[in-house]
Image (spheres, rainbow, N blue to C red):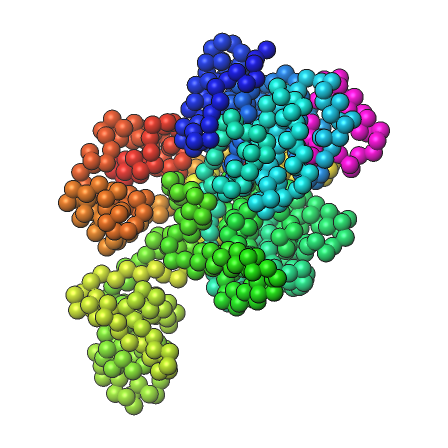
Amino acid sequence: MLAVRGTKPLESEQLRAGAFLNCRTVYYLRAMLNDLPSDAQVLDKLKSTFGYTTFRPLQREIVGAILARQDVLVLMPTGGGKSLCYQLPALLHDGVTVVVSPLISLMKDQVDKLQTMEVPATFINSSLDASEVGRRQAAVVRGAVTLLYVAPERLVMPGFLSLLSSVKLALFAIDEVHCISEWGHDFRPEYRELKRLRELFPNVPLAAFTATATRRVQADIVEQLALEKAAIFRGNFNRPNLYYDVRPKKEAYRQLTDYLQQRGNSSGIIYCQSRAGTENLAERLRRDGFSALAYHAGLENDERRRRQEAFIEDRSSVIVATIAFGMGIDKPDVRFVVHYDLPKNLEGYYQESGRAGRDGEPSDCILFYSYSDVIRQEHWIDQKSSETEREIARQQLRKMTDWASATTCRRRLLLAYFDDSLDCEVESCCDICGEPSQMVDFTRLAQMFMSCAIRTGERFGRDYLINVLRAGNDERIARNGHDKVSTFGIGRDQSVDTWRDLAESLIQAGYLHREPNEYNVLKITSMGREALSKREKVTLRVAKSREPGPAVSTPQPHQELFDQLRALRQRLAEERKVPAYVIFHDSSLRQMAAELPATREEFARMQGVGEKKLRDFADDFLRVIVDYSRRTGAEPTKITPPPERRLEYSESAQESYALFNRGLGSEDIASTRGLAISTIEGHLAAAIEAGEDVDISRLISQPKQEVIETAINELGPLPLKAIMERLGEGFTYSELKYARAVW
Ligand code: ADP
């Protein structure tokens, strides 16, 4: 047997980049000594049980460390795939893996999922009667249980401890470990007791997991659980599949219903500040034909559970909730989280919005923001009795409002709050960054509009100017002699709406200024004048008309078949009394509905199809798929990459390129211009794409470029993440971006 603490410990300084390399080294060394399952065995288990062919970032390293019986602390965002990190080793280890989980509902859900994969898992908690607890304990003693889920308070009960001492233990996995810290947002005193495990079972390794990222909480966990020697894995808190969107809270209800309509039956959470707010909004949505339930702490326990289950089992698409709804809800296919009211702080916002898209599929995080919400919150803060509390709350609110009213990348700002920098290319990022794709050359129209304002003496508002341009119906025009100006009627070919959007965009971009005290008269700013006189190119952000969901490359499913598969899944789920996603995730169904597997072998290749699910479900699903293909003559669809969102070769990028040409490196350009390095990299890539004569050798070596190009030829140019996964270590995203631009 291995000496548990014989492995070289990794200190917390080694976190981030370095730690896993060391773990891997340790792991491989041990594997060579035949102590550990080989990489192939691990991958085989991953596919045969979980149905996955690849690991998510850090999973492989964490699994390796756990198999090497090291203590680990894992800080990984929601949806990062923490459970697999202990579930997979549990299947390869001898003995019982004890999982501590704070919520009973969550335990049942996890155990249900594991049982559909034929994993010997069970839970013991207060929802069971004594005889059932006895039966399950006996199964543990018999060695019939690999994964045992318990609540922290049970774990330290004397009876339970003696049960544990009578069996062989592989690992303690502590989920939601931030509950141990008073600094976290979910402190649970019973978690404090867990430190006793260290004294009672000094030879059983401990793996602790949380999605809370702040350094304060991290330090607290390490101290409480004596994890000083643990390997710490800090995942990237970036959630690339989430799209952040802050919208003015104006006609919010209409905006919301428009959005819900677009999203069809997708699942989503709408957070409101107050209990009454959730009830009112849910009621109104129901009246308007949406399937929505309210959820808050004021409901009876049974009622709460009923509503939560209705949401989890897809019987209600939308749950309108206070923040009482959240932890322990690990529904993977939540497609959107809307904050109808302003959250109190950014940490809470990150956790709540993070409940969208656990399955890695594109999902939206929308916040409705208004100044009156800020005032309302300030009012509540003023009610607090302690000055320190008021001060902390004010600071937190300030961070929140700064974020909501930011004019630079929201993702980057959110990550900066957690001390994370953004080192990952995201195709569709946030309402601010998403916009470059909608930067459009409006030079001609902008010149027309601004000239019209000048010709009419800069004394009129937007709609009057539009009437002049479109020779519209306004008797003032003739009276003022404006039917004689050169811009009269030259804009007839554009709609009123186009002109209005253009005028608003010119204002936002600083070409025009609206005089609020002078009947909203539009005046040209000095920037506008300069643009006109120098005939500069005017590129503007156009009003958003974004389709729901960010664009990522996915195979296009045959919709009718997809709906049939969903219905089949629903039926099977109801028969088995489990949530639908326990059978298959949407992403698996989508893949089936796109690739049309016709045989068991083909079906086994679908994401999420392990041996057990192949046995249980292949026949039912294949029948529907084959029948559909035969009836409609449908062909498998190919992966269609979304239209590439190309950045305009903006003036800003030209400026970066000019500095690059003067010999500056991207870091120097970034600090000279006060911009982020990744922005500069984007600029240089844009310059390459625009055909500028960029000295590529200064950015990437020839051999690397060739390797990347080969990968792109094989996988296509998107998404970068897939290419990165193919390349493995030794490449950076910036190198990838450059090589792709050349390609
Ligand atoms: P977390 O606990 O970190 O929030 P989960 O463990 O619930 O995340 O995993 C999130 C989702 O990702 C789950 O639906 C899980 O099935 C899926 N998942 C985990 N690992 C993989 C993988 N290697 N490949 C594909 N899907 C995965």
Q: Which residue ends up furthest to the left in the rendered image?
A: 662
Where 164 sits versus 246, above or below? above
Q: Residue at x 16, y 65 (%)?
A: 534
Q: Residue at x 56, y 14 (%)?
A: 3
Q: Is residue 672 visible?
A: yes
In this rendering, position of residue 685 left or right of residue 39: left
Q: Nearer the viewer, residue 724 or 492?
A: 724
Q: Confirm whether the magenta stretch covers residue 157.
A: no
| Percent of width and height locating residue 156 | 72, 30
Where 627 sits versus 250, above or below? above
Q: Nearer the viewer, residue 335 or 176?
A: 176
Image quarter of residue 422? top left
Quadrant of the snapshot with the C terminus? top left
| Percent of width and height locating residue 163 | 75, 22
Q: Which residue ends up furthest to the right in the rendered image?
A: 131
Quadrant of the snapshot with the N terminus? top right
Q: Residue at x 46, y 31 (%)?
A: 12
In this rendering, position of residue 120 left or right of residue 549: right
| Percent of width and height locating residue 329 | 63, 43
Where 412 sits versus 44, above or below? below
Q: Which residue ends up furthest to the top in the rendered image?
A: 33
Q: Nearer the viewer, residue 18 or 121?
A: 18
Residues in magenta?
A: 125-152
Where 256 sits versus 19, above or below? below
Please give the count of numbered marks on the rendered protein: 0
Q: Which residue ends up furthest to the bottom in the rendered image?
A: 479
In this rendering, position of residue 433 left or right of residue 157: left
In this rendering, position of residue 418 left or right of residue 271: left
Q: Residue at x 47, y 25 (%)?
A: 10
| Percent of width and height locating residue 466 | 33, 76
Q: Confirm whether the magenta stretch covers residue 137.
A: yes
Q: Is residue 601 visible?
A: no
